[in-house]
Amino acid sequence: MIKDQFRLAVVQANPCLGDVSGNAEKVRHHRKLAAEEGADLVLFTELFLSGYAPEDLVLKPSFVAACKRELESLAQETADGGPALLVGLPWAEGGKLYNAVALLDSGRIEGLRYKVDLPNYSVFDEKRVFNSGPNPGPMNFRGVRIGVPICEDTWTDEVCECLAETGAEILLVPNGSPYNRGKTEERMQIMLSRIVETGLPLVYCNQTGGQDEVVYDGASFALNHDHSLVMQLSQFQEDIGYLDWQKNADQNWVAQKSRIMPLPQTQEADWLACVLGLKDYVNKNGFPGVVLGLSGGIDSAICAAIAVDALGADRVHCIMLPYRYTSEASIADAKACADALGVKYDTIPIAEPVEGFQKTLADVFAGTKSGVTEENLQSRSRGVILMAVSNKFGAMVVTTGNKSEMSVGYATLYGDMNGGFNPIKDLYKTEVYRLSDWRNKHHPFGVLGPSGEVIPNNIIVKAPTAELRENQTDQDSLPEYDVLDDILHCLVEEEMSLDEIEKRGHSAETIHRIEHLLYIAEYKRRQAAPGVKITLKNFGRDRRYPITNRFRDRS
């Protein structure tokens, strides 16, 4: 029995969704590390055994049963007298399915607690698959009354107040909280509110790693009841921290100050989120590497740099696919970028397939003017070639469209939209430029790419163009990107009315046009590859607009 002190290990690890036995091995590995450091209890993140978020996979009874079997095995292993475990998993009981946390100690399951407040907004859809649990009381861990609210249970006051009123002494919070800009500060403020209301110290343990579009950024922390920060773990990395707890003269548990890691600022955080999202998507799905078209433009260059930072140069294959409209400057810039990154680089001209398609379609197209259709044959020929290389060698195609382009449909289905994953899907064009310039000046911790100028400056400063016809630039058909991106942010992230947007200095005609393009491009976005969520509202998991939609804000 613990009387007045104990040691807690806080584990922010990277589970793989569905790899139940592999995740259980991670529990064993971290329990062994924690035992060597004298820990009494090891805290893991939300639904760690299954991986988070499992979506409809938890509706499969055999999956839930597999999680239970592994939990029971882990419970038996705690009979060795080592650290106890707090582990999250889906749990079936009484014909209902819960998002649960189990306390494992002394060779058995000592307690179970169920998530009460199921989120059903943004990327979350938990009410679809889980039942809400009853308001919980604390669990008794060797004489310490621990409250275990699960993630969303701490974002409102009811569950934590219930735990405090029923005798909890410490709040240990397992989380699966995804990254978006500003999230770390938002979490901190909300957890401080729970401490103010309950008077209890709190440990926030958050998952790290990529899962499809979502990146979980870790950044776990602990706060004493006096609001002081006593632990801050790394962001976007697996990490483990230790907290030594003692009772003070007032019989309140107080944690001694532990490791405080600095958190990356906004641009570094965005970059690391893109890197981690791509890295885990590729590795967890078993791809040997990636291949992408390197055009000499900013979007493909930043994607190549992200890929090298995520996977290393030896797993990245870049291909230049020139046609008659590809400038010598673009060819030189693409080569310079490939050289700076140290990747495998090939050039495959596309004149023969493009002209072959034109010849094949000549009779059907007879009597019509050449235009966008013929331009798109270039993009689709490139897409076919990249997919062929992918099929032959197994590398996944990285698609490279930014959020500005995806918003207004400035992309070709079955052409430059081909691919398995898009690391910059949730970055507007102006953000792509800022991040590219930032990466040239910084070398973030843990990345595998080189330092220095990895994106040639000429790529950053030149006018963007798809190079599908002579002297083409993006601004031939789109507003300047600072104007476009501001309007899109207002429409997508803020859901502002056209009247409100016009007050920001934009013309009504431009706003109406961009709104129309945004709506009619929905069918393309439904067919687009997944990509890393960075903003408050990404396309796909966050923003789910209908494809068939005649509404326009005509105020």
Image (cartoon, helix red, strand yellow):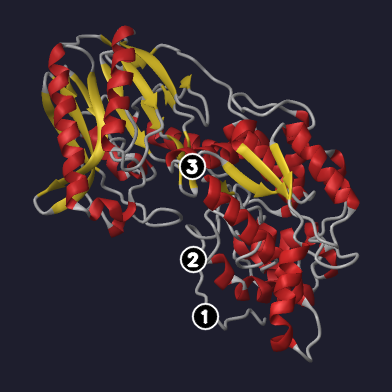
The x and y percentages for residue 91 are 18, 44
Residue 14 image-quadrant placement: top left
* Kind of element beneath mark 2: loop
Position of 432 relative to 525 (above/below): above
Q: Is residue 314 left or right of residue 286?
A: right
Could you say where residue 201 lies in the image, as x and y percent from the top left? 36, 24
Disc 2 residue type (three-letter): Arg
Q: Residues within 10 Å of mark 2 (few under 14, many from 20)?
A: few
Q: Is residue 376 visible?
A: no
- Label 1: few (<14), some or many (≥20) within 10 Å? few
In the image, residue 110 above or below residue 47: above
- Going by the numbered disc 3, the residue's amino acid type is Phe
Q: Which x, y percent locates residue 535?
A: 59, 50
Is 218 left, or right, of 272 in this rendering? left
Residue 72, label in figure: none
Distance (Cα) linking label 3 and label 2: 29 Å
Nearest the eye: 322 or 471: 322
CB under 8 Å between discs 3 and 2: no
Mark 3 / mark 2, whichever is N-terminal: 3
* Residue 544 numbered tag: 2
Q: Nearer the viewer, mark 3 or mark 1?
A: 3
**Above or below for 509 versus 125:** below
> Where residue 405 sits: x, y (%)?
69, 62
The residue that label 1 is drawn on is: 548
What residue is rendered at 55% in x and 61% in y?
Answer: 528
How many C-alpha atoms fall within 10 Å of the one at disc 3: few (<14), some, or many (≥20)?
some
Q: Residue furthest left?
A: 94
* Residue tagged 3: 287
